[in-house]
Image (tube, grey):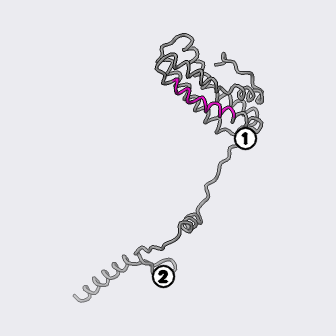
Amino acid sequence: MRPTLTIVILFTATTLAGCASATTDAGTVASSTPTTTAVSPSEATRTATRGATPTPTITPLTLSREQAAERYLAIIRPYNVALEKLEQAINSGEPLATQTALAAETAEELETEIGQLRGTAWPPEVRTQVDGLVAASENAVDHWSEAASAQTRDDLIQAVLAAAEFDGTDAASTIRELLDLDSYDERDY
């Protein structure tokens, strides 16, 4: 009985010791009890970033003039189509609900256009003009939103006219010229 008791005691002691510590690759015993060391926030940041893999920065390639022309037309088309549909609905006397829905679509398409214009790597010769178009468009968005929530036809018309003040015509015309595109023609939409 004694040899069995010794084996049980030895097994229990070994198991308990295994729970309390572990041997590292260097052969030293490491405690399983967590330890805490106080460090300054700046040291913690340095320690946390040491050895961290840097996140690569992706820089889009600048478009050629031909690519920029194609991209520009693709970006502006949905907004121009929505704008023309709204104009036709107003001119033909469609119900207010139809007009406000089209104004909401116009606002949404303009917001999408702004994001795409910003997110494109334009050739240097058109960047300033694109920035000008984006700035004008940002000023128009709130007016399009007002048109979308208009309670009367007069309110809708007033909001549309206010948005039209920020149509970016000068910037858009210059962009078209610099990219060798034809002038804007609403019949294209």
Q: Position of residue 32 (x, y in %)?
A: 41, 75
| Residue 73 placement: quadrant | top right
* Placement of the N terminus among the 4 image quadrants: bottom left
Residue that sits furthest to the bottom in the current view: 2
Residue 88: give x, y in percent of width and height: 57, 14
Q: What residue type is labelled 1?
A: Thr
Q: Along the line of sight, which residue is nearer the eye, 164 or 76?
A: 164
Q: Which residue is identified by label 2?
A: 28
- Image label count: 2
Quick one: which residue is furthest to the left in this view? Answer: 1
Disc 1 and disc 2 in contact, CB within 8 angstroms: no
Marks 1 and 2, Cα distance to the nearest angstrom?
A: 57 Å
| Within-10-Å neighbours for mark 1: few <14, some 14–19, many 20+ | few
**Residue 50: x %, y % from top left:** 59, 66
The residue stretch that appears in magenta: 132-147
In the displayed structure image, the side of residue 56 where residue 26 appears, left or right: left
The majority secondary structure of the magenta stretch comes to helix
Q: Which residue position is annotated with label 1?
A: 62
Which tag is nearer the camera, tag 1 or tag 2?
A: 1
Q: Which residue is drawn at 71% across and 37% down?
A: 122
Q: Report helix, strand or loop for mark 2.
A: loop
Please rate how many residues cluster around mark 2, counting C-alpha atoms within 10 Å: few if below 14, some from 14 to 19, many from 20.
few
Question: Residue at the location (48% across, 72% down)?
Answer: 38
Question: Quadrant location of the C terminus?
Answer: top right
Amino acid residing under circle 2: Thr
